[in-house]
Image (cartoon, coloured by chain):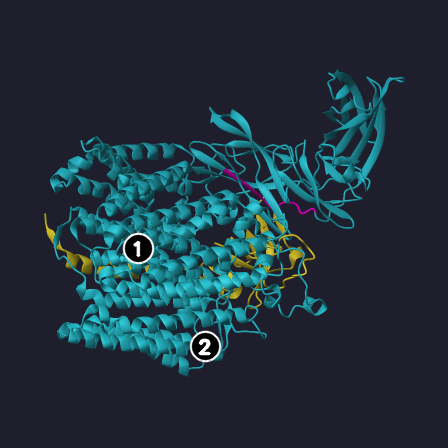
């Protein structure tokens, strides 16, 4: 018992507590919801406190894990796998996003926060909403339980489920009987209260005891990861389907008969019956053992029980961890995942409102309170997605912000459906139409989030995506999560279908109702397309096919999505006028004429300018291929369809431009007109502002992705060439140090790696070995450098060299010097590239503007190299530069030669192939520190080339001793130290150290222009501003209606 | 102006959705690549994905003048081919456990348009004794 209170045990206690409390909260609030008249019963209080304790437990798990990481407790698997001694504290929070367990916790954290806000807000919807949230929390908690249920335990739990189900069944029957006898409502549920409460409590305590029993439950040896399609799961899902069919038939039956009383408790009966049936099937089948979740507090020993080290030393704890992936050690990666997860988590709130509406029969009242939450959720999710795109653009090397990667798409689709649901809600609020559609869209948003989680975490994407987590064998649980909500919601929907009020109206084509509906359709269609393409691995698994993503992925998505984008532009432009102006069709033409004209004129101007520029649309190659195919094709219909395709798409980007601009100007028009009105209607312009933002984003995306140009080609500006074959394209240039090269629009020179700039500070020895020491310091730029220095080898300093003794390091800890070997900052090298813009003027190339330096980065991480780009942001474009393929100099061992050179002014001394000529000696001013400072100007010759070195010597006032200064000539690999001044003989003494062999140094660079990408970021901000305004407005409305 | 009944509108939308899904899936099936082998890819002109490993490492080079990376690849059924790629050697190529090339079989060689590298899994040959204190490559998470 004495090691009971280790960090891991405390953590597991919190995990168990959070699980149990989620269960109690879900059940209690559910029951509290059912109670008529909103009487303040014990159930509400029980629910409230258990949810809050759940939230505190989640915070406890977080804190415990964070403390374990911060104190480097590598006996725990999660800490070892995701952190290391070198990890700075401010990146430690990112350890939570690298592992599945941590990110589940993040999700739970946000749910707890949102739930707490909703609890304290109160309101009639509170109980059922929190119940739903708590139920999701329950399943999420189960993902981090990490318990190993042997068969006996599984059967025991099933027995418990049977007990609860049977009891519920009884309750259901009792309700029927009581309703038939018209008893007082208050007495109805009293008998059940106490028993249910008690059973829930016993359940929770048993589960907790189970968890505390052993060391994270992996007990004896191996376990089998849950296969997603094991026989148990299959039986489970088949049963779902069967019950669904039965319910549908039941609903039909009740339509035909008029047996209302039976129907009101039908849901309860049937759900109980369903649980019962499942339980029986499961109890009778071969369950085997189940692994439930994966705990973040698993010990290293339990994760690698077979590892040989434990036989040598059973208490072995590693000295250091595996470390956090360096891609996550980045400012954006600290804020992007929490934002994105808040977006995901918040989709449960409107979902819970819909469930509440369906359960309680309040089919229309849910929209007002749910609207601000929906807008909030969509806004945060959108921000999270864009952050991910921006991070990818800034940090990764593929030169873009969106890859149509499976995980990216899986987060985009819920966002699109979420936007659709907002439009559907607006339609309902205005005309009471499309209620079922609205409910469906809100539900779909949440279900798609669950699907997205399944894709990311189950390992089904395998090799196809760079984003996925390591498969932890949770795929079975994830499927249960997905299907449990999917099917129960459909169940509920079907059962309540006939009760949901329907307005059967006729609507005009030129009406806001139709346009809003059309908007929803566009979002749904886009989402269908993206979802199917993204789900190819799932399709492969189900149908046994072998499909991979289209090779021309960007073009594929462009071909389909461009038309949806065009429609969005047109609909959001015209739609706004229909919405606000309530115009008739004939007046519509007048209303939209002005923005339409501006858009067409502007688009035409831009198109004309484009034709004169060297920019080319990215897919022109594919268009040409179509044209060729059309010309060479045999069949008439084939020919016509190819020509049609060509004609259609050749103007697609121009049409998109016009459409996006139309949306921008139409919405600006509306905003101006609304703001001018007497009632100062600016506050309702949230939607219009959002449309303006979105339109600008489309423009930004069109240009920065459609017209991006690779400039690192060996051509002069104005010399346009189009490559017929893929293999003739040359997108990269090789640059040698100090040799300028002309690329398209620039002259670029590789000036060498960026090194530590003196003076340095915060020098610390952080690790020591026999032959090396690891030193960390900060240079004058504020950059932190940490690297291993061999004790008895050479250190590189300012491109120069030092000969240390073993005591050397201690010696210069008291001085300010700069050093790095080779120039590494935490293993990161920055390659200096000097750019000079060139323009063509009357057939000559001239220089334009100031030169600028960019530092793309390359990071060596054990065996792998990760490169990061550098960018120069202009108003009208970004210059995006990255380096790849650097020489690997790991085997390189430098050779040195030393020379002593004594010079008088005007002397030339020859040593080997070099000549040293002392041009001048200058005396510098003395000050409080230095009594004498002198600078020597030496010209060093090697054959025809020469370079000037200016080493300085200083004499300290304090002790009168000289401080020799160095000057480095990187071109000669030479360092000259001004050693002494011999006043008697009037000579100066120098020590020259030269590295005879130089490591190979070159970079291979790719540079890309991303035109008008700033519109994308600008549009995002405006979009978010629109969202915020809308939230403010809808919150006021929701508050006003209480 | 003509008025439409909502119910009909919804049904129309559903039909439209089915139609759209149909043509979309058709297009996707036509454009979708497949996981294939060198031998299979030689039989058609389509772009395919081939999973394999980098072999004969000494027999590979990068020509900076032509900007072509050439290497030998072994696919999952033992087929071997020279692969050409119009970019420098991808990052982490040396450390990669598996490599996926996307491109076309040109007869003499395989022209890769994209290369995806798969780093060794952290939970594979894991050294928990930590002889090296440097970080290991792993999948970035999201």
Q: Which residues are magenta?
A: A880-889
Q: Secondary structure at mark 2?
A: helix
Along the horizontal axis of the image, is A956 left or right of A40?
right
Measure how far apart labels 1 and 2 are at the Cα level: 34 Å
* Chain B display color: yellow
* Chain A display color: cyan
In percent of width and height, residue A250 lies at 21, 75
Using the rendered image of the protein, determine whether residue A447 is visible from the camera's viewpoint: no
- Compared with residue A837, is residue A47 higher up or lower down, i.e. above or below? below
Q: Which residue in the protein does label 2 denote?
A: A154
- Residue at 76% x, 16% y is A923
In percent of width and height, residue A510 lies at 15, 46
Say which mark, if any, is on residue A456: none
**Disc 2: which chain?**
A
Depth check: give the residue in front, A889 or A965: A965
- Compared with residue B13, is residue A474 higher up or lower down, i.e. above or below? below
């Amino acid at each position: 018992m004495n090691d009971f209170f280790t960090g891991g045990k405390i953590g597991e206690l919190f995990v168990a507590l959070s699980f149990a409390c989620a269960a109690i909260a879900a059940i209690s609030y559910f029951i509290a919801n059912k109670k008529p008249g909103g009487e303040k019963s014990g159930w509400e209080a029980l629910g409230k406190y258990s949810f809050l304790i759940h939230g505190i437990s989640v915070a406890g798990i977080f804190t415990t894990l964070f403390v374990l990481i911060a104190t480097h407790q590598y006996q725990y698997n999660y800490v070892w796998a995701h952190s290391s001694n070198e990890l700075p504290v401010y990146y430690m929070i990112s350890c939570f996003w690298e592992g599945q367990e941590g990110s589940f916790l993040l999700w739970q954290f946000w749910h707890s926060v949102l739930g707490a806000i909703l609890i304290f807000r109160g309101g009639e919807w509170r109980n059922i909403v929190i119940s739903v949230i708590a139920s999701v929390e329950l399943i999420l908690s189960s993902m981090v339980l990490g318990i190993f249920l042997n068969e006996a335990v599984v059967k025991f739990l099933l027995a418990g489920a049977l007990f609860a189900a049977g009891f519920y069944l009884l309750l259901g029957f009792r309700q029927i009987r009581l309703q038939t006898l018209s008893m007082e409502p208050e007495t109805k549920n009293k008998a059940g209260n106490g028993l249910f409460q008690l059973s829930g409590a016993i359940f929770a305590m048993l589960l907790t005891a189970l968890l505390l029993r052993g060391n994270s439950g992996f007990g004896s040896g191996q376990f089998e990861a849950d296969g997603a399609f094991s026989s148990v799961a299959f039986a489970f899902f088949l049963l779902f389907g069967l019950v669904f069919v039965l319910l549908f038939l039941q609903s039909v039956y009740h339509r035909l008969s008029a047996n209302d009383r039976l129907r009101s408790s039908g849901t309860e009966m049937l759900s109980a019956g369903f649980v019962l049936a499942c339980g029986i099937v499961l109890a009778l089948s071969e369950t085997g053992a189940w692994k439930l979740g994966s705990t973040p507090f698993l010990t290293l020993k339990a994760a690698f029980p077979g590892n040989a080290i434990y036989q040598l030393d059973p208490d072995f704890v590693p000295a250091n961890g595996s470390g956090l992936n360096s891609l996550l050690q980045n400012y954006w990666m600290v804020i992007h995942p929490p934002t994105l997860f808040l977006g995901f988590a918040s989709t449960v709130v409107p979902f819970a409102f819909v469930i509440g509406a369906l359960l309680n029969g309040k089919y229309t009242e849910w929209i007002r309170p749910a609207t601000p939450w929906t807008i909030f959720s969509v806004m945060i999710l959108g921000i999270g997605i864009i952050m991910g795109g921006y991070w990818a653009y800034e940090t990764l090397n593929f030169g873009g912000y969106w890859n149509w990667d499976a995980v990216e798409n899986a987060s985009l689709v819920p966002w699109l459906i979420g936007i659709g649901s907002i439009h559907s809600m607006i339609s309902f609020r205005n005309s009471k139409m499309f209620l079922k559609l609205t409910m469906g869209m809100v539900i779909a948003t949440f279900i798609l989030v669950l699907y997205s989680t399944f894709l990311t975490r189950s390992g089904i994407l395998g090799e196809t995506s760079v984003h996925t987590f390591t498969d932890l064998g949770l795929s079975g649980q994830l499927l249960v999560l997905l299907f449990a909500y999917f099917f129960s919601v459909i169940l509920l929907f079907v059962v309540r279908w006939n009760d949901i009020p329907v307005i059967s109206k006729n609507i005009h084509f030129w009406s806001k109702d139709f346009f809003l509906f059309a908007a929803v359709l566009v979002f749904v269609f886009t989402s269908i397309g993206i979802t199917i393409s993204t789900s190819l691995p799932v399709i492969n698994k189900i149908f046994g096919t072998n499909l991979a993503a289209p090779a021309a992925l960007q073009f594929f998505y462009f071909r389909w999505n461009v038309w949806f984008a065009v429609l969005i532009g047109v609909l959001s432009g015209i739609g706004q006028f229909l919405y606000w102006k309530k115009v008739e069709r004939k007046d519509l033409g007048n209303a939209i004429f002005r923005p339409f004209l501006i858009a067409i004129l502007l688009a035409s101007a831009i198109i004309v300018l484009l034709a004169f520029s060297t920019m080319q649309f990215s897919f022109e190659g594919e268009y040409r291929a179509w044209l060729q195919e059309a010309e060479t094709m045999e069949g008439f219909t084939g020919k016509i369809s190819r020509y049609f395709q060509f004609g259609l798409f050749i103007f697609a980007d121009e049409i998109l431009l016009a459409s996006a601009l139309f949306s921008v100007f139409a919405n600006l028009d509306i905003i101006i007109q609304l703001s001018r009105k007497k009632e100062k209607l600016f506050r309702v312009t949230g939607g219009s502002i959002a449309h303006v933002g979105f339109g600008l984003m489309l423009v930004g995306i069109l240009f920065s992705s459609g017209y991006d140009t690779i400039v690192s080609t060996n051509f002069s500006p104005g010399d346009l060439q189009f490559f017929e074959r893929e293999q003739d394209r040359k997108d990269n240039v090789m640059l040698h140090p100090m040799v300028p090269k002309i690329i398209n629009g620039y002259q670029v020179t590789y000036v060498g790696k960026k090194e530590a700039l003196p003076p340095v500070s915060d020098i610390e020895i952080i690790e020591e070995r026999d032959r090396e020491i690891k030193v960390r310091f900060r240079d004058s730029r504020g950059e932190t450098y940490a690297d291993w220095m061999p004790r008895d080898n050479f250190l590189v300093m300012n491109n120069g060299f030092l000969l240390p003794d073993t005591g050397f390091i201690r010696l210069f800890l008291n001085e300010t010097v700069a050093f790095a070997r080779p120039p590494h900052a935490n293993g990161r090298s920055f390659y200096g590239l000097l750019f000079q813009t060139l323009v063509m003027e009357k057939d000559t190339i001239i220089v334009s503007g100031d030169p600028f330096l960019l530092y793309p980065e390359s990071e060596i991480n054990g065996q792998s190299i990760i490169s990061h780009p550098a960018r120069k942001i202009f108003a009208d474009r970004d210059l995006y530069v990255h380096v790849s393929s650097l020489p690997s100099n790991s085997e390189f061992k430098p050779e040195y030669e030393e020379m002593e050179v004594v010079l008088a002014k005007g002397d030339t001394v020859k040593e080997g192939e070099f000549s040293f000529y002392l041009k001048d000696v200058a005396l510098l001013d003395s000050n409080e520190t230095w009594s004498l400072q002198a600078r020597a100007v030496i010209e060093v010759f090697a054959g025809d080339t020469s370079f000037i070195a200016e080493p300085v010597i200083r004499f300290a006032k304090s002790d009168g001793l000289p401080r020799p200064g160095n000057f480095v000539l990187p071109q000669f690999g030479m360092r000259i130290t001004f050693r002494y001044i011999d006043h008697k003989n009037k000579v100066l003494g120098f020590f020259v150290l030269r590295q005879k062999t130089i490591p190979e140094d070159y970079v291979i660079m790719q540079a890309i222009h991303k035109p008008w990408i700033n519109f994308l970021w600008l549009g995002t901000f405006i979009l978010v501003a629109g969202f915020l305004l809308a939230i403010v407005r809808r919150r006021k409305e929701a508050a006003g209606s209480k | 102006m003509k008025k439409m009944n909502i119910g009909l509108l919804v049904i129309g939308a559903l039909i439209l959705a089915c139609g759209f899904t149909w043509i979309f899936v058709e297009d996707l099936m036509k454009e979708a690549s497949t996981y294939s082998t060198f031998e299979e890819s030689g039989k058609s002109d389509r772009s395919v994905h081939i999973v394999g490993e980098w072999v004969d490492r000494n027999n590979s080079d990068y020509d900076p003048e032509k900007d072509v990376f050439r290497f030998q690849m072994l696919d999952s059924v033992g087929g071997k081919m020279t692969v050409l790629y119009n970019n420098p050697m991808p990052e982490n190529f040396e450390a990669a456990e598996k490599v996926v090339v996307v491109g076309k079989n040109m007869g003499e060689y395989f022209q890769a348009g994209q290369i995806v590298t798969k780093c060794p899994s952290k939970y594979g040959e894991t050294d928990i004794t930590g002889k090296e204190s440097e970080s290991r490559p792993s999948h970035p998470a999201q």
